[in-house]
Image (cartoon, rainbow, N blue to C red):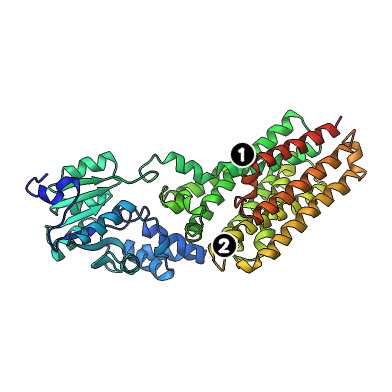
Amino acid sequence: MKQDDAAAFSGGQPQPLQGEWLLCDLDGTLIASDMLDESFWAASAHNPLAPLGAARALASGGRSGLKAQLAGLTTVAPEVLPYRAPVLELLESWRAAGGRCALVTASDERIARAIADHLGLFDAVHGSTAGQNLKGAAKAAFILEHYGAQVTYVGDSAADLAVWQSVERGITVAAPQALRRKAEATPAQILHMETAPPETGHRLPPLLRALRPHQWLKNLLIFLPMLAAHALELSTFLQSLVAFVAFSLVASSVYVLNDLLDLAADRAHPRKRHRPFASGALPLRTGFWLAPGLVLAGFALALTLGPVFLAVMALYYALTTAYSFRLKRLAILDICTLAALYAMRVVAGGAATGIELSAWLLAFTIFLFFSLAAVKRQAELVDNQASGREAAAGRGYRTEDLMLVSMMAVASGYLSVLVMALYVESEAVQGLYATPQALWGACGVLLYWLSRCVLLTHRGEMHDDPVVFALRDRTSQVCMVLILGLFTAGSF
């Protein structure tokens, strides 16, 4: 490490000479993400066939051709990217002290310029073009040719070691210890910049959050056919349990895919922007192996339950994938799809155990979960109204649709209560319950709970997912216990 330039880092902070250049990398440095991955998922969100075009571009033009292809397919919104606050502060203080800043990145130059224009912190911008991938040794040679060695380079990866070998000073950003040691072994004078958690934290917590294990509770619907038919044998329970695990793995795969395709909309949302991929806590590249790995594991388990269950799961996966790519952007149809996906969990429970489903159960499930899906959209529109936005990001609704969506939530919820009430008076219930009158109490509790959900959502007090809200809300927990208790009491 050179010691003759220590004055440049006085007080542990880089201090420029008048007009001195600070060269900053983009991927993993200025932002806690990678623009190649961002471009890939943004292009895929607009066109499901974009990955095929990307593969052709990579085969014919290498990484630089791939970057140019993806940059031409879509526009990544620079205002919602996960910027690293300490790096932004460094750029601002450097310019305030009389220095100059340049963005030098392996990302496509068009994307780099859009980001630089948004931030207004750079005096020059350099990125990859169709014929040049500005990374590693190529970036080091470019910097020496255009700026010389007396610069400070800010980077974050092993590819930046070639640059630190060539320049006077360097700063690592959120670098692991192994990379820090390698950087310190270069001729450059090195400083290390920390970033706030979760960016420098362990990858396991955000990885688990990306799977959304709390959403697996929706898959408890798989046990509903077994409970409704009072088929409480151990073999039936084990079949339902395997189906539950298989559905949970496949559902998590879809959640990961949905988060990757919905990055821009999530980052514009007051709560969803904290999701692991949207916030930058989890690299987007993780999704390339996580999503297919989960779905393969889920289908491997599904094979043990027979062809009917496997077919139901395949249909579920196809419908959820279609929802992620397109259906979630279509008003009304997105709510219908969510209700159908809930109903398919019940169908899967019947397919796994061989229990024939009643029309009562299917009708109740469809109306109830259409209502909850509408409540979810209602909550998003209430957030839009509070923030003054005219449309829901990534959805087919406008804020003016709030009243209609609320009406759909109420009407469908009350229809589910009506179906339950008709079921209580049907002949089918007489053979399953010794005291079916107790089920009338369950109808009353469900009526209260659904009405309360819509009211709280109207007031802006509902989590955007009513199922998650119900699991955390004390009143909802009491209602669930009462309903289970009344159904149990009806059996005796």
Secondary structure, mark 2, is: helix
The residue sitting at 69% across, 45% down in the picture is 309
The residue sitting at 14% across, 54% down in the picture is 167
User: Which residue is outermost to the left?
Assistant: 4
Q: Residue 182 appears at what percent x and percent y?
A: 20, 42
Quadrant of the rendered image containing residue 225: top right
Give the residue pinned by disc 2. Answer: 384
Quadrant location of the N terminus? top left
Can residue 412 be seen from the camera position used here? yes
The total of numbered circles placed on residues is: 2
State left or right for residue 95 relative to residue 315: left
Quadrant of the rendered image containing residue 238: top right
- Disc 1 and disc 2 in contact, CB within 8 angstroms: no
Secondary structure, mark 1, is: helix
Give the residue pinned by disc 1. Answer: 245
Amino acid carrying mark 2 in the image: Asn
